[in-house]
Image (tube, helix red, strand yellow):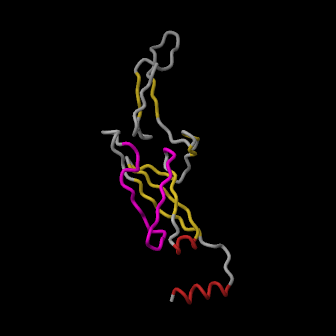
Amino acid sequence: MTIEIKPGYDTDKVIVFPSKGNEAFAYHQSKLNIHFALSNEDVNGVTINNSYVRDGDNLIYTHSLSLEDALLSKPIQVRTLDGRNINLSLDETITPQTTHVILGEGMPRKTNSKERGDLSIRFNIKFPLNLAVSNKDAIIDVLK
């Protein structure tokens, strides 16, 4: 049996094949239900990680960076699900509320697989766990 998996299928998609499921003597053959699940395994050489979340045809990517990199707005590189790298330079201070949207870099649309949803990039800023009192005072002075 051949099953065609179309681009854009989501985890809520179920493909049902009547009379293709389990066979038992003296019972009707059951239906075969195929459910989709997300995996963290390699796909075409790209390790899928938990930084991506799907929202319909759109993808939400959470990029982790240090407080220093956020304050300096250092360029970031995002590895897409199909293995490409997107270089991104933001000309603003990156905060935990910052979201940057890249149009057309999400999942293929269910209605037209040639069109794609959008990719939203959110930021997880890692704060230092230990700061000397003198460093804390210096940061506070600068922020005033």
In this orientation, which residue lies closer to the viewer: 86 or 9?
Answer: 86
Rendering coords of residue 99 (x, y %):
42, 64
- The image shows residue 53, relative to residue 100, as above or below, that is above
Residue for point 44% across, 25% down: 3
Count of numbered badges drawn on the protein? 0
Rendering coords of residue 41 (x, y %):
58, 41
Secondary structure that dominates the magenta span: loop
Q: Residue furthest top?
A: 26
Q: Residue furthest left?
A: 111
Residue for point 36% across, 49% down: 117
- The image shows residue 101, relative to residue 21, as above or below, that is below
Magenta span contains residue 37? no
Q: Magenta residues? A: 82-108
Q: Is residue 75 left or right of residue 8?
A: right
Residue for point 48% across, 70% down: 94
Rendering coords of residue 24 (x, y %):
52, 14
Residue for point 56% across, 87% down: 140
Q: Is residue 123 left or right of residue 14?
A: right
Magenta span contains residue 83? yes
- The image shows residue 140, relative to residue 57, as above or below, that is below
Rendering coords of residue 2 (x, y %):
45, 21
